[in-house]
């Protein structure tokens, strides 16, 4: 294994490898993308000479051993593999931290804003290096090795980033679990990835409320058993009272206090897993998407640079939690690989008041701002309050991701929040894609409110029909991607067959996104939403199958079906149709109990919005639940229910309509 710089000076290369500034020089040498012509030219190059393009992008990061083979991919279901730069050796953490020390030691890496407005921290690249080295030493002292899995269940505090980078530094595979997930959901993830350690905090603080993270870890481990996890590292964040298990629990501050602030980082192969991140699908339990080190970093870094038109003096803020892919790629890896200043926010948009986002933008002079449409809709719900107390004149770009943004919301974001001076960059992508796939480039793409517009370099989207035939020109269909890109997830942790079945079998030879889309006459893409049973609640992805399974695990529920319905702030909300067990009377108490139950099973992100009790569900004669009908009734749009003649008991529909909970 090659040794990386120990955080020394520029050009110092311990084993005669690449100088630490080579990647920065490569960035400076890239052609500018300042016009539609520039975009067309580079896009053509990126697809016609894909390997050359991706080799140029990969030289923007520092390799301990340069790669020779750029791409080795097969989308054939019998031999599916995706590998990029596979003979190259690198260290992701060194790329995000050490290599900036020569030129950016005193530059702010993380600008942290706590839940309470007075709570702030500023962490320079030099300080980041020290903190990450200490923790990397601490993890190794605890016996964490390259390839071991570490679950990170933390609030949005700098130590969560230290933890991700320390794992990357020693080759451990992190799996960040969003703090809004329950103990049960956490246990499932710990078991599935076989974590050796959990890093958490005593409690999180959000919107003035305490989130019992350590208690959830205790409960999760009581369920998961201790055969895999032998240590819990606990950050003191809130001072909350917590239970302590001697021999297992370790205080974060005590562990790092004992460590040296230098750490010699070894390189890993480009395909070495960097992290596993769980997301919901249409069936079964959440799946752990496995992302690699080299290709992922190249992709996160390149998309960050182009999509946000990043410049050295920008102050960049992405509001996503690090528990989601957006937090991984655009709070942590993309910005830090570019030596950017990344703002990290612990709180919520409406605490202490709805003006919070604007106030933080003014305080830090944020120039690039990235959030989710659901947050914009929250601000719009009381626009005066949202805009009060801030001018937001430091902004030069606004971006969004996670769900469709309707044109009215897009315009308010642009005109009111951005004072009409900023492009709005609507970015379409997924946990599986690692980084942005379809988005306008600020100086090179004509913007259209509601459209994610054009593919990023090297990305070949297409629309197909139910027979997998490619549709040309203006069309509406399933969104697929024809060929691989470096940031693509490599597999599902522990279940490669599920990876193949989920993404490469519906439309053989192509990556199937699970989304539908429309392409207009100009060739711009409009994402129309999931075509499978996946909901998007406040930008959070939830499978109807997992909500159903949590619902029927309640002893009073015999059967259940879950659908989404349109919601003004959340985008989509959860509607449960449940049949009570014979002899049980469904009443408002039972409804409240069931909501609390589901919330406890899955976490606050999955709190049901409606529970309609029903003696029966609409099923075909073969027993398949007709969700199409349930979706229409939930949306209070039952005039055209379509063909119901195949139902086993057509009378059920009348009853469901009569008892519907959403009424205009
Ligand atoms: C699903 C992926 C953006 C990464 C974070 C979410 C939906 C995402 C958009 C957009 C319309 C979008 C899709 C996608 N989605 N971005 N700009 N416009 N829909 O990642 O949790 O894996 O969710 O979010 O349905 O499949 P995720």
Image (spheres, rainbow, N blue to C red):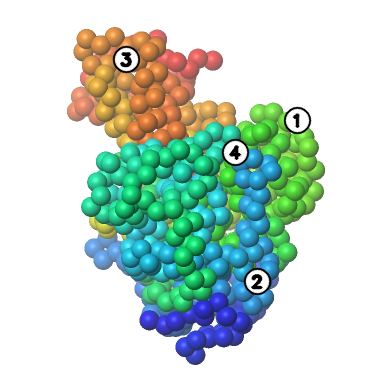
> Can the viewer see residue 301 in this picture?
no
| Front position in the image: 141 or 434 | 141
Asked if the residue under mark 1 is in contact with the one under mark 3, i.e. CB atoms within 8 Å, the reply is no
Residue sticking out furthest to the bottom = 16
At label 2, counting other C-alpha atoms closer than 10 Å, the crowd grade (few under 14, some 14-19, many 20 or more) is some
- Report the residue marked by disc 1: 384
The tag earlier along the polypeptide, 4 or 2, is 2
- Quadrant containing the C terminus in the rendered view: top right
Mark 3 or mark 1: whose residue is earlier in sequence: 1
Question: Where residue 594 sits: x, y (%)?
Answer: 35, 22
Choose the circle earlier in sequence order: 4 or 3.
4
Numbered tag placed on residue 614 in the rendering? 3
Q: Residue at x 47, y 67 (%)?
A: 259
> Is 291 above or below relative to 651?
below
**Callout 3–callout 2 Cβ contact below 8 Å:** no
Residue bearing mark 2: 105
């Amino acid at each position: 294994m090659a040794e990386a710089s120990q955080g020394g000076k520029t050009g110092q290369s311990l084993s005669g490898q690449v100088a630490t500034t080579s990647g920065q020089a490569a960035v400076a040498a890239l052609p500018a993308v300042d016009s539609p012509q520039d975009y067309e030219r580079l896009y053509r190059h990126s697809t016609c000479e894909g390997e050359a393009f991706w080799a140029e992008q990969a030289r923007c990061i520092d390799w301990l051993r340069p790669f020779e083979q750029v791409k080795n991919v097969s989308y054939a279901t019998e031999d599916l593999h995706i590998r990029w730069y596979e003979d190259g050796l690198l260290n992701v953490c060194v790329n995000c931290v050490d290599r900036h020390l020569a030129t950016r030691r005193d530059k702010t890496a993380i600008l942290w804003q706590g839940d309470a407005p007075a709570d702030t921290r500023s962490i320079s690249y030099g300080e980041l290096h020290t903190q990450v080295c200490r923790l990397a030493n601490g993890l190794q002292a605890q016996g964490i090795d390259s390839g071991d899995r570490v679950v990170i269940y933390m609030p949005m505090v700098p130590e969560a980033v230290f933890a991700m980078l320390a794992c990357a530094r020693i080759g451990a595979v992190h799996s960040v679990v969003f703090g809004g997930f329950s103990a049960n959901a956490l246990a499932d993830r710990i078991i599935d990835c076989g974590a050796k350690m959990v890093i958490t905090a005593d409690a999180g603080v959000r919107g003035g409320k305490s989130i019992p993270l350590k208690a959830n870890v205790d409960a999760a481990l009581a369920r998961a058993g201790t055969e895999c996890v032998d240590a819990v590292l606990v950050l003191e964040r809130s001072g909350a009272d917590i239970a302590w298990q001697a021999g297992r629990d370790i205080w974060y501050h005590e562990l790092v206090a004992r460590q040296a602030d230098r750490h010699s980082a070894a390189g890993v192969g480009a395909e070495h897993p960097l992290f596993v991140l769980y997301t919901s699908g249409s069936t079964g339990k959440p799946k752990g998407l496995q992302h690699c080190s080299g290709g992922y970093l190249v992709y996160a870094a390149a998309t960050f640079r182009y999509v946000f038109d990043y410049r050295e003096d920008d102050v960049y803020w992405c509001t996503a939690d690090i528990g989601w892919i957006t937090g991984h790629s655009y709070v942590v890896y993309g910005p830090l690989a570019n030596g950017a200043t990344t703002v990290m926010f612990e709180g919520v948009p409406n605490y202490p008041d709805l003006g919070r986002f604007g106030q933080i933008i003014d305080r830090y002079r944020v120039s690039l701002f990235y959030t989710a449409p659901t947050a914009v809709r929250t601000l719009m719900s009381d626009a005066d309050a949202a805009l009060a107390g801030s001018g937001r004149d430091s902004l030069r770009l606004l971006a969004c991701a996670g769900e469709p943004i309707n044109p009215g919301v897009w315009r308010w974001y642009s005109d009111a929040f951005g004072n009409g001076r900023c492009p709005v960059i609507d970015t379409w992508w997924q946990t599986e894609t690692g980084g942005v796939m379809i988005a306008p480039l600020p100086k090179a793409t004509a913007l259209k409110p509601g459209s994610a517009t054009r593919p990023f370099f090297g990305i070949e989207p297409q629309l197909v029909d139910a027979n997998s035939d490619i549709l040309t020109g203006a069309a509406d269909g399933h969104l697929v991607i024809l060929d691989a890109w470096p940031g693509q997830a490599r597999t599902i942790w522990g279940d490669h067959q599920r990876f193949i079945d989920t993404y490469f079998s519906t439309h053989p030879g192509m990556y199937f996104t699970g989304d539908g889309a429309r392409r207009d006459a100009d060739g711009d893409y409009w994402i129309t939403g999931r075509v499978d049973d996946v909901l998007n609640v406040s930008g959070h992805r939830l499978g109807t199958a997992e909500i159903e399974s949590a619902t029927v695990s309640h002893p009073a529920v015999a059967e259940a079906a879950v659908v989404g319905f349109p919601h003004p702030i959340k985008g989509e909300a959860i509607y449960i149709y449940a049949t009570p067990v014979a002899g049980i009377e469904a009443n408002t108490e039972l409804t409240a109990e069931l909501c609390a139950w589901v919330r406890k099973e899955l976490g606050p992100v999955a709190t049901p919005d409606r529970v309609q009790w029903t003696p029966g569900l609409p099923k075909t004669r073969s027993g398949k639940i007709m969700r199409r009908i349930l979706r229409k009734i939930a949306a209070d749009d039952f005039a055209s229910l379509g063909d119901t003649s195949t139902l086993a008991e057509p009378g059920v529909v009348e009853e469901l309509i009569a008892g519907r909970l959403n009424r205009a």
